[in-house]
Image: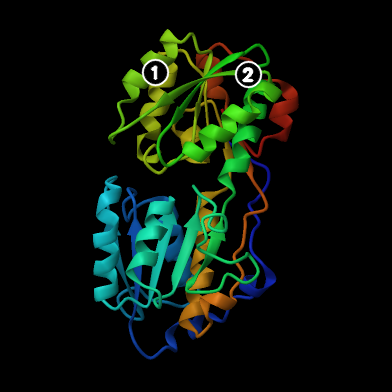
């Protein structure tokens, strides 16, 4: 694996991290609530956030504890879990992933600070924050413009596989905005799309790939949804079995065996979330902390998968890749 460029994100105000010992000057054990749609506490990006807190001087079990609540894919459970965190008097709620997570947290409290890692929706368009510079209210954090990346992924797919014309797009309720963007921009990329909607998690991916094959798809684009994420190894396995190259949004998919991915480094994004937690615990108000956006993105190519599919990735694309898995 060749690592050519590092993820860079965050404003100067957040990059000025305090001395490590300052993390323990709060004089009490603080509670950090984490509200998850589906991913477990052990997920690498959550661990990256906790590790960054340690680097800032916080000691889990001594200066802070984590109250983790996971809806396990059932978004209808989120409001109850969010209310439970509020009853536990958490100092901060981390709401990551889809809108449903933030929506539940925001309905549960208008006073407890909420730090977002918004990767599946636009918090400005949905009215959760007033602007990036001045979010207002009790919500701040990191915002990934996932919708805009959809067309970029299709461009990379076309560049890697110039003869491909028909692409199956796997989407769900959470990624519906991305699906609409894909439909809008597909003609410009010279692609004809076959929408394959998945419902009732965990998703039946075998049926989805069969539907793609029936539609004579030549490749599969997996839109970004936290419900897909835990099934990324199955996505890669079925893609190989079906002889359909897959393109996804996070490097974890490519490392699991998908042909390529394009998106942010989730671990670094959640390390940035830890900076917000630190600032708020030291007295900053969410309303005054600008919402940040990742500015660098990773293109990851899996040449092992390409070889298994009998594909040759253009050298021009290989040279632009941030990581190449061989």
Residue at screen point 67% across, 28% down = 155
In the image: residue 31, left or right of residue 45: left
Q: Nearer the viewer, residue 213 or 236?
A: 213
**Relative image position of residue 41 (x, y in whole percent):** 32, 56
Which residue, given by chain and number where applicable, does mark 1 sit on? 209
Quadrant the C terminus occupies: top right
Residue at screen point 53% across, 18% down = 219
In the image: residue 149, left or right of residue 73: right
**Residue 29 in which image quadrant:** bottom left
Q: Earlier in the sequence, mark 2 or mark 1?
A: 2
324 relative to 125, above or below: above
**Relative image position of residue 229 (x, y in whole percent):** 40, 40
Judged from the image, the secondary structure of the residue bearing numbered disc 1 is: helix
Which residue, given by chain and number where applicable, does mark 2 sit on? 191
Judged from the image, the secondary structure of the residue bearing numbered disc 2 is: loop
**Relative image position of residue 114 (x, y in whole percent):** 44, 69
Residue at screen point 58% across, 67% down = 130
Q: Nearer the viewer, residue 9 or 55?
A: 9
**Residue 187 in which image quadrant:** top right
**Relative image position of residue 224 (x, y in whole percent):** 48, 39
46 relative to 312, above or below: below
């Amino acid at each position: 694996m060749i690592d050519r460029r590092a993820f860079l994100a965050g404003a100067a105000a957040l990059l000025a991290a305090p001395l490590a010992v300052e993390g323990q000057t709060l004089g009490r054990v603080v509670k950090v609530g984490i509200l998850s749609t589906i991913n477990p506490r052990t997920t690498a990006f959550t661990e990256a956030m906790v590790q960054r807190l340690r680097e800032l001087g916080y000691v889990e079990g001594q200066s802070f504890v984590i109250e983790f609540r996971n809806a396990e894919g059932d978004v209808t459970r989120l409001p109850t879990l969010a209310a439970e965190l509020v009853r536990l008097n958490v100092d901060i709620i981390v709401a990551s992933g889809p809108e449903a997570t933030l929506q539940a947290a925001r309905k549960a409290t208008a006073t407890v600070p909420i730090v977002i890692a918004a990767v599946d929706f636009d918090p400005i368009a949905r009215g959760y924050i007033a602007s990036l510079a001045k979010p207002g209210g009790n919500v701040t954090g990191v915002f990934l413009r996932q919708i805009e990346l959809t067309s970029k992924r299709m461009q990379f797919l076309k560049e890697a596989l110039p003869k491909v014309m028909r692409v199956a797009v796997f989407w769900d309720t959470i990624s519906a905005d991305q699906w609409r963007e894909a439909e809008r921009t597909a003609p410009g990329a010279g692609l004809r799309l076959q929408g394959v909607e998945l419902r009732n998690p965990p998703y039946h991916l075998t049926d989805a790939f069969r539907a793609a094959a029936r539609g004579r798809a030549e490749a599969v684009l997996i839109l970004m949804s936290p419900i897909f994420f835990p099934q990324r190894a199955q996505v890669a396995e079925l893609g190989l079995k079906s002889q359909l190259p897959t393109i996804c949004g996070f490097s974890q998919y490519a490392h699991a065996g998908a042909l390529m991915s394009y998106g942010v480094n989730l671990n670094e994004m959640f390390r940035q979330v830890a900076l917000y937690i630190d600032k708020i615990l030291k007295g900053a108000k969410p309303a005054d902390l600008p919402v940040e956006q990742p500015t660098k993105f990773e293109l990851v190519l899996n040449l092992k998968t390409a070889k298994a599919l009998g594909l040759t990735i253009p050298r021009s694309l290989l040279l632009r890749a941030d990581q190449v898995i061989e």
